[in-house]
Image: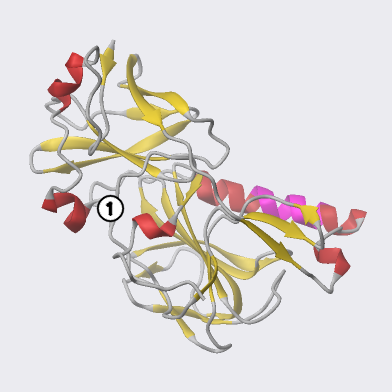
Amino acid sequence: MIRSSIPGRRPRPWRLLAALAGVLPATAPVFAQSLPRNEPVPGGVAVIALPHQSSRPRVAYGRHRAMVVRHAGTWYAVVGIPLSTRPGEATLKLNGDHPLHFQVASKTYPSQHITIKNRHMVNPTHKELKRIWRDKARIDKALAHWSGKTEVPLRLRMPVHGPLSSTFGLRRFFNGEPRKPHSGWDIAVPEGTPIHAAAAGTVALTGNFFFDGNMVLLDHGQGLVTLYAHMHKIKVHMGQHVQAGQVIGVVGRTGRATGPHLHWGISLNDARVDPALFVPKGAVAAR
């Protein structure tokens, strides 16, 4: 059994084998330059140095394959942790059978209460629910897709520049009724503002969806997908390769939106994670 500690956390005495993983301290410059910030909490990302491997190891987290990247001669697993994860010990599977343990810390997210005038966006009809389930099947398929690229962009640029009207992880209440936590950032910018690709990737999904409105999903490789919702207009098509910074659409207020904004989300191994871990600190300010 192999146990690994997380960068920036002091290993427990009984986890002496963690030293084999070559974990770097959280202040090491390489993390600031090339990897997302390590924050092993629900909705966060765990960056875990792996024991020496001559070739790229295969890592799984739950039912999903996890990203593995190489930096400075060491392999790292970059793992998205679902918001529903309970704090405590979590386990990766290295090369199919070797368990690799890490700790998920607790994190409390604030609540947000929103009033929606269109009651169908809170309590859809039976017909609308059928559409929602069809939408979900398409979105889930795109988010779960795996493309085995060796080079994956892990430091992302902002798709638009503006204040945050809603942050990640908020426990949301629509018209007083509890709903799923907020899975991304809402960036308040005027309708018609150009939306730029956060990194190079392939268009994995486009379309108009009940809750998300006009939306684009970009696949960047190894389970990393960025999501852009509530667009006024989409300017890319399925299967198209886009460059970092390329305009992929313009901001709107389609779907369940109380005003013009961009909902920007990041999915890693099919877990929605905090965009703050992938962009420079101070890139946006809460409104």
x, y percent for residue 101: 34, 21
Q: Seen in the image, is 205 located left or right of residue 48? A: right
Query: What is the quadrant of residue 255 in the picture?
Result: bottom right
Direction left: furthest residue: 73
Q: Amino acid at mark 1?
A: Val
The reply to whether the magenta stretch includes residue 45 is no
x, y percent for residue 183: 56, 55
Residue at image location 55% in from the left, 81% down from the top: 251
Q: Main secondary structure of the magenta part?
A: helix
Query: What is the quadrant of residue 186 in the picture?
Result: bottom right
Name the quadrant of the N terminus: top left
Total marks in image: 1
Q: Seen in the image, is 99 located left or right of residue 229? A: left
Dot 1: element: loop
Nearer to us in this view, 223 or 173: 173
Residue at image location 24% in from the left, 46% down from the top: 150
Q: Which residues are magenta?
A: 130-137
The reply to whether the magenta stretch includes residue 132 is yes
Nearer to us in this view, 276 or 70: 276
Query: What is the quadrant of residue 118 in the picture?
Result: bottom right
x, y percent for residue 115: 78, 69
Q: Which residue is mark 1?
A: 152
x, y percent for residue 61: 42, 29
How many C-alpha atoms fall within 10 Å of the one at disc 1: few (<14), some, or many (≥20)? many
Residue at image location 50% in from the left, 44% down from the top: 271
Residue at image location 89% in from the left, 57% down from the top: 127
Q: Is residue 54 above or below residue 40?
A: above
Q: Is residue 263 above or below residue 170?
A: below
Q: Is residue 280 above or below residue 192?
A: above
Nearer to us in this view, 40 or 108: 108
